Image (tube, helix red, strand yellow):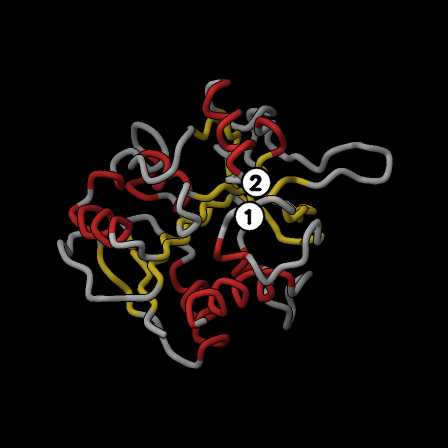
Amino acid sequence: MRVAIIVFPGSNCDRDMMVAVEALTGRRPALIWHKQSYLDPVDLAIIPGGFSFGDYLRCGALAAHAPVMNALHDHAARGGAILGVCNGFQILLESGLLPGFLAQNKTLKFVCKQTNLSVEGNAICELTKSLDINERLHIPVAHNEGNYFADAETLDSLESNGQVVLRYAKDETGVSDNPNGSANDIAGICAANGRILGMMPHPERAMGAGHKSADGKKLLQSIFEAIIT
């Protein structure tokens, strides 16, 4: 399986994601610098977390116009699989590969904590099909702008089309673990074709072996299994 990780100035989770991918696939992914205008054929392109271009203007705003993004749009148009994590999710939104926006957290503070996620049962995302319906995942977040919002029509479309993949879960009393004020407790969404997944939580930081959870490994493994089958 061929995996590429797109690297921008300010990316700081690219190496963590590289280690996670290699641990699960046995192959080291290619690190692609943002100035590269082409992308060799790959099965999965990953945009990692970080602070691309120092979050100048808006998170992901400059990265969305980097030369490599043209190649990523071509990859997406061919039905290629893409995963965007945290800043990668922000870049997918800014580039139009996913709908909606990410604003500053409701608390106006940076949030770094473990979160409980629920896997949506009606999600059309091909990359998470091997996860159990309503499965709970324990994966951390680390962001200042993770408050997902969209206009009412877009939210209704995401919900009715099954494009909401992950939500911040509610406990037994009905209290949500939403750390940022995200609309409908949304933690991750996918494109209409089910092949592009954007999410705020960091699966590469939940790989076991010293991490507080190994649920990120489970999520990434689901993505890899979907690609090779």
Count residues near mark 1 (Cα–Cα under 10 Å), then give few for <14, some for 14-19, many for 20+.
many
Instruction: Determine the secondary structure under disc 1.
Output: loop
* Residue in the picture at 49% in, 28% down: 157
Q: Does residue 49 show up? A: no
Q: Position of residue 171 (x, y in %)?
A: 80, 40
Count of marks overlaid on the render: 2
Amino acid type of disc 2? Ala
- The answer to whether 160 is drawn above or below residue 118 in the figure is above
Dot label at residue 187: 2
Give the side of residue 117 with respect to residue 2, left or right. Answer: right
Tag 2 near tag 1, CB within 8 Å: yes
Q: Nearer the viewer, residue 72 or 180?
A: 72
Q: Position of residue 42 (x, y in %)?
A: 28, 66
Dot in front, 2 or 1:
2
Count residues near mark 2 (Cα–Cα under 10 Å), then give few for <14, some for 14-19, many for 20+.
many
Dot label at residue 68: none
- The answer to whether 159 is drawn above or below residue 68 in the figure is above
The image quadrant where one finds the C terminus is bottom left
